[in-house]
Image (tube, rainbow, N blue to C red):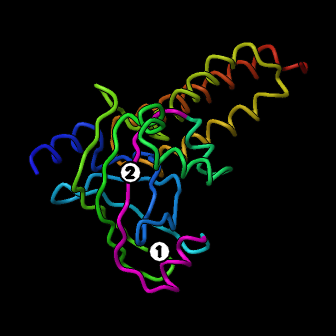
Amino acid sequence: MKDVCESLKAIFSTDTWGEVIVSFYNENRVVGLMPLGLKLSEECTLSGRLYAGSRFYSYIISAGITELKCNVCVTQDPVLFCTAIFDKSKAIEILTREALLKKYCDICFTGFCEFQNRGDIIDLRVKIIEIVLYRELPRVFTRVNAAIIEALIWFTKIPYMECRDLATILEKLEFLREIVYRSTQKKLYIEFIDLIYSKALELVREIESSRCRSGD
């Protein structure tokens, strides 16, 4: 249990969703596979949510399922996330073959997932029973990291954009800021995205009041 706790705490946090690929099993058959956001929860477990409208949500509700065996693949490789959405049969093959797991996953957690129906939302909690490490330093993908980096990239482009495109840039930054707001409670990350957005507003106003006055 100590090793499980240490591994989880080294990868996941209580304030930011970590994006992983989770496969669910019923009698050794894969009945669900999807990218899923998980957080570190009490008693060294992982918690997440399923929302009404998804096929797997409907399966859990209709079958009255309260627990399934599951496998959590931690990876920063976008290929596996795309495969999990667009080619589930291939993703299932990857997550059920050891040689492919080594290629795509940094670390895998096997355990049991408990489901609690709350109407349009199903709360889930994963209890880990086994860990298989494939990379020495596994790191979980977060939408926060991706959104902040992308926001910085767009910010650096502002001075070189045509005047007619400045409003579009601000819309993109607003969207990325919303992603950060929804994906974390960590104050530092929120301060970073707010700083990027506020500086972008200042820069756009400066550009509009100078070179954009007579049109671009």
Who is closer to the viewer here, 76 or 204? 76
- Residue at 41% x, 33% y: name it: 102
- State which region is magenta: 55-77
Location of residue 32 in the rendering, given as x and y in whole percent from the top left corner: 52, 64
Q: How many marks?
A: 2
The quarter of the picture where the C terminus appears is: top right
Quadrant in the rendering for residue 69: bottom left
Q: Is residue 69 left or right of residue 171?
A: left
Sort mark 2 into few (<14), some (14-19) or many (20+) by Cα contacts within 10 Å: many
Who is closer to the viewer here, 87 or 36? 87
Q: Is residue 24 left or right of residue 177?
A: left
Secondary structure found at label 1: strand
Quadrant in the rendering for residue 107: top left
- Residue at 33% x, 28% y: name it: 135
- Residue at 74% x, 13% y: name it: 160
Who is closer to the viewer here, 9 or 199? 9
Q: Is residue 187 left or right of residue 26?
A: left
Q: Is residue 1 above or below residue 166?
A: below
Q: Which residue is mark 1?
A: 121
- Residue at 45% x, 49% y: name it: 183
Location of residue 104 in the rendering, given as x and y in whole percent from the top left corner: 48, 34
Q: Is residue 23 above or below residue 118?
A: above
Location of residue 162 in the rendering, given as x and y in whole percent from the top left corner: 83, 19
Q: Which residue is mark 2?
A: 72
Q: Amino acid at mark 1?
A: Ile
Q: Is residue 102 left or right of residue 158?
A: left
Kindly tell me whether residue 173 is visible in this rendering. Answer: yes
Location of residue 28 in the rendering, given as x and y in whole percent from the top left corner: 41, 66
Q: Earlier in the sequence, mark 1 or mark 2?
A: 2
Kindly tell me whether residue 190 is visible in this rendering. Answer: no
Q: Amino acid at mark 2?
A: Val
Q: Is residue 10 above or below residue 135?
A: below
